[in-house]
Image (spheres, rainbow, N blue to C red):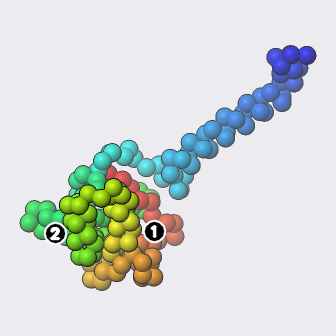
Amino acid sequence: MSLREGLNARPVLTYSVAGGIILAAALITIFESGFRDNSQIPGPISEGKSFYTDDLGKTFFTDAAGLVVPFEHDGKQAVAAVVVRCGDGPPEVQYIARYRRDALAEIEKLKAEKPPNLEGQLSRLSQEGMEVASPGGQRWVTTASPAASTIMAGKKCPDGKVPIEIMP
């Protein structure tokens, strides 16, 4: 018996296997898209953009991704902003981030020297050389400190759910 004859002889099995494959593909697509809460469907991502703030998180703006923070913006110091949304509510800054002074000095040195592992060194500094603060920037802590986890986790939404990070 050929494969086609076998499939035709067992239509329930054939449709079940085909349906399973389609369902698996759909689930993989959804999870790879980064949906963390199926009640929230993120908007389109503007490639090459990130959120920043020059007033410690009261407001935010978009600019090119990957800028070394802090930087000058309209005469003020701008830092990175992680923006979230609760349900249908307005977007708000969950926390702000910047490089420590010593990390900024190391970045400048690496850019001048251009070592063969420049990308790896910059990647390491983006993990180890950052500090974060809640909006308002009263207390900056290194990302290696236990307090950083609390700041980056932010607060829960009024309905108890975790806010969804949005992208520009």
| Position above or below: 81 against 39 | below
Estimate the x, y position of residue 96 in percent, counting from the top left: 31, 70
Q: Residue sitting at 38 percent across and 72 percent down?
A: 128
**Quadrant of the rendered image containing residue 18:** top right
Q: Residue sitting at 66 percent across and 34 percent down?
A: 22
**Of helix, strand and loop, which one carries label 1?**
loop
Q: CA distance from mark 1 to mark 2?
A: 29 Å
- Tell me whether circle 1 and circle 2 mark residues in contact (CB < 8 Å): no
**Of helix, strand and loop, which one carries label 2?**
strand
* Residue at the extreme right: 1
Which label belongs to residue 157? 1
Q: Is residue 91 visible?
A: no
Task: Determine whether, in the image, residue 68 is placed left or right of residue 77.
Answer: right
Task: Determine whether, in the image, residue 139 is placed left or right of residue 7.
Answer: left
| Position above or below: 23 against 94 | above
Q: Nearer the viewer, residue 165 or 91?
A: 165
Estimate the x, y position of residue 103 in percent, counting from the top left: 28, 72
Estimate the x, y position of residue 4 in percent, counting from the top left: 82, 17
**Quadrant of the rendered image containing residue 71:** bottom left
Q: Residue sitting at 77 percent across and 28 percent down?
A: 15
Q: Judge the density around disc 1: few (<14), some (14-19), many (≥20) Cα neighbours within 10 Å.
A: some
Q: Residue sitting at 45 percent across and 76 percent down?
A: 149
Question: Which residue is label 2 attached to?
Answer: 77
